[in-house]
Amino acid sequence: MNTSKHILLTAVLVVLSALGAGVMAQSKTGAIVQPPLPIGSVTTVNAVEVSDGTVGFNRMKDETTFGYSFLGPTVGAFPGSFTLSMNCSPAISISNEKNELTGGSWTLPVYMATIKGTGYDGSLYGTIDKGTMIWDKTATKATMYIVLNVGGGTQAWDGVGGYATFTGTLFVDEKTQKTMLTGDLVFNIISVLPIQ
């Protein structure tokens, strides 16, 4: 009986060490390679342009587009409806290769699934800290990177703060001829989320 316990213990240790080898591997140099750290809460955005903004001048007297806005659904960690209103300098035109985002705001009402169905969970909101739009050679597609401040929230998100990053693409949909914004929001909520 003791022998079968030892055989079983040995078998368990072999299996555990094999699983551990899958998690931690050695590189060719012999250094132990750790698995990547988990990323933050990813939310995918698929939005459409609702306003091409108004061209004016900022405090520095630079031509700026104010209120260049998008609205669309989100899926993933925070399913809901994302609104983004950006200020871009220089003003958006076909000849620009790059636009800097100089301000703006965003909101994200969140609708979480529960036992009773999908229900409003509260909203996250904040401002644009910084960002860029880098246009391709045809000036019909831009790669976007935005840092969003999480200024707070309502209901389940009351009192939260932190930041989020958005990485995505702005392009004209060939079928609808509408300007689209797609990409991923990654939230890093600094404040402790309330228990739901």
Image: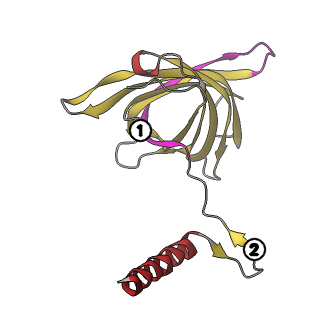
Circles 2, 1 touching at the beta carbon (< 8 Å) = no
Q: Residue 53, can we see it?
A: no
**What amino acid type should be assigned to the residue bearing mark 1?**
Lys
Q: Residue at x 75, y 74 (%)?
A: 31
Residue ranking furthest to the top: 59
Few, some or many residues within 10 Å of mark 2 (<14, 14–19, 20+): few
Marks 2, 1: nearer the viewer: 2
Q: What is the x, y in percent for residue 148?
A: 61, 29
Asked if residue 79 lies left or right of residue 139, the reply is left
Magenta region: 39-62
Q: What is the x, y in percent for residue 166?
A: 57, 39
**What amino acid type should be assigned to the residue bearing mark 2?**
Ala
Asked if residue 151 lies left or right of residue 76, the reply is right
Nearest the camera: 75 or 23? 23
Which quadrant of the view contains residue 6?
bottom left
Q: Say which mark, if any, is on residue 178.
A: 1
Q: Say which mark, if any, is on residue 31.
A: 2
Which quadrant of the view contains residue 156?
top left
| Chief secondary structure of the magenta portion | strand
Q: Is residue 50 magenta?
A: yes
Q: Split into 4 quadrants, where in the image is the N terminus?
A: bottom left
Nearest the camera: 25 or 49? 25
SS type, badge 1: loop
Q: Is residue 193 above or below residue 95?
A: above
Q: Is residue 67 above or below residue 13?
A: above
Q: What is the x, y in percent for residue 22?
A: 54, 74
Return the disc, 2 or 1, that comes first in the chain's sequence.
2
Calculate the distance from the C-alpha at mark 2 to the C-alpha at mark 1: 50 Å
